[in-house]
Image: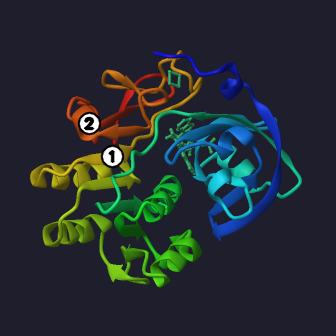
């Protein structure tokens, strides 16, 4: 295991340059940071919310590739830290360590990729989709949410779709936008009707488990982004262990060969005390 350069793990205090409400529960926070600017799609950072906590969040945009040079994280409110971060505004300060972990590997030019996102999982997939498009990969994006009010990144996705650079299919469980049903049902149809070189996915683990099963039957390699409790982010504390791997160092992106040996994948995760809890 090679060590991260000290610089990556050193906390930098950065100013929030802008915020964008993606929907009623999700906000994107933009900031400037040299290391995040040169991150790869799928990597995450540890964000310190002063006086509250430090939490892992994926980079939803990467400075060197965004029009305004800013990087961002996109946060869905689920508890104390995410609530506090979602309440922050431009001009306030946060701490950032990272970027950490491995990243999505893009399929080669001219290849065909299926990207399947569920809810906030789309945050990790946005920089990947933009990279695939840049690399002339034929990209189909399936994005599933519960209801229309849970949609996010629709401007970025809509622009790529309108330019004909991605094929975009949205599903809502209640049928209020796009096709009614689960994104896994749409994935099953799309996978049976087309040829893909790779499937990328991020979202609820039960969803990714189903996607993995579908891809395995068809012999298509996957790259999935897994979540476990992350504390140190540099491979020391063991809180993110999944099978023989640590999500913070060996992941968060896992390929088919690794997923096959993670017996907990789709079944169990460990809580803050290390106890296994069903997914
Ligand atoms: C690699 C990675 C990338 C992530 N990227 C994003 C993202 O882009 N956007 C986003 O909204 N969320 C992301 N998450 C999840 C996010 O870290 C948690 O929602 C957040 O830590 C919850 O903190 P809280 O205090 O608000 O909630 P709490 O009430 O403390 O926890 C709510 C739930 O969040 C999870 N959680 C809490 N703390 C952690 C932690 N330290 N590490 C992992 N999970 C935790 C647990 O499942 C917990 O049950 C990511 C998680 C990981 C592991
Ligand atoms: S978070 Fe400490 S080993 Fe992964």
Specify few, some or many for label 2: CA neighbours under 10 Å numbering under 14, 14-19, or 20 or more.
Answer: many
Residue 247 spot, x, y in % from top left: 44, 31
Would residue 273 be visible to someone looking at this image? yes
For marks 1 and 2, the one nearer the N-term is: 1
The outermost residue toward the front is 109
Residue 30 spot, x, y in % from top left: 73, 56
Q: Is residue 46 above or below residue 58?
A: above
The residue closer to the viewer here, 158 or 268, is: 158
The residue closer to the viewer here, 4 or 144, is: 4
Would residue 77 be visible to someone looking at this image? no
| Residue that badge 2 annotates | 259
Residue 150 spot, x, y in % from top left: 52, 70
Q: What is the quadrant of residue 135 in the picture?
A: bottom left
Q: Residue at x 43, y 81 (%)?
A: 164
Q: Residue at x 42, y 45 (%)?
A: 104
Q: Quadrant location of ligand 1?
A: top right
Q: Is residue 218 above or below residue 171?
A: above
| Residue that badge 1 annotates | 223
Q: Is residue 269 above or below residue 23?
A: above
Q: Residue at x 59, y 23 (%)?
A: 232
The label nearer to you, 1 versus 2, is 1
Query: Does residue 141 appear left or right of residue 130 in this picture?
Result: left
Q: What is the quadrant of residue 60 in the picture?
A: bottom right
């Amino acid at each position: 295991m090679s060590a991260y350069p000290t610089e990556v793990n050193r906390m930098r205090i950065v100013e929030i340059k802008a915020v964008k409400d993606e929907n009623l529960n999700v906000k994107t926070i933009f900031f400037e940071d040299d290391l995040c600017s040169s991150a790869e799609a799928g990597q995450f950072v540890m964000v310190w919310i002063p006086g509250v906590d430090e939490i892992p969040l994926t980079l939803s945009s990467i400075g060197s590739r965004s029009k305004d040079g800013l990087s961002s994280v996109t946060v869905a409110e689920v508890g104390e830290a995410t609530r506090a971060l979602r309440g922050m505004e431009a001009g306030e300060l946060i701490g950032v360590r990272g970027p950490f972990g491995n990243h999505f590997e893009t399929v080669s030019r001219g290849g065909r990729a299926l990207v399947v996102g569920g809810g906030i999982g789309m945050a990790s997939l946005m920089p990947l989709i933009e990279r695939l498009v840049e690399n002339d990969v034929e990209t189909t994006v399936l994005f599933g949410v519960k209801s229309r009010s849970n949609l996010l990144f629709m401007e970025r996705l809509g622009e790529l779709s309108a330019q004909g650079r991605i094929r975009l299919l949205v599903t809502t469980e209640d049928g209020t936008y796009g096709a009614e049903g689960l994104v896994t049902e749409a994935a099953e149809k799309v996978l049976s009707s087309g040829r893909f070189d790779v499937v990328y996915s991020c979202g609820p683990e039960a969803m990714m488990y189903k996607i993995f099963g579908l891809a395995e039957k068809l012999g298509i390699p996957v790259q999935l982004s897994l979540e476990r409790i992350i504390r140190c982010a540099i491979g020391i504390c063991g809180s993110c262990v999944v099978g023989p791997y640590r999500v913070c160092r060996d992941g968060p992106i896992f390929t088919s060969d690794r997923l096959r040996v993670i017996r907990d994948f789709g079944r169990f995760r460990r809580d803050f005390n290390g106890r296994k809890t069903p997914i």
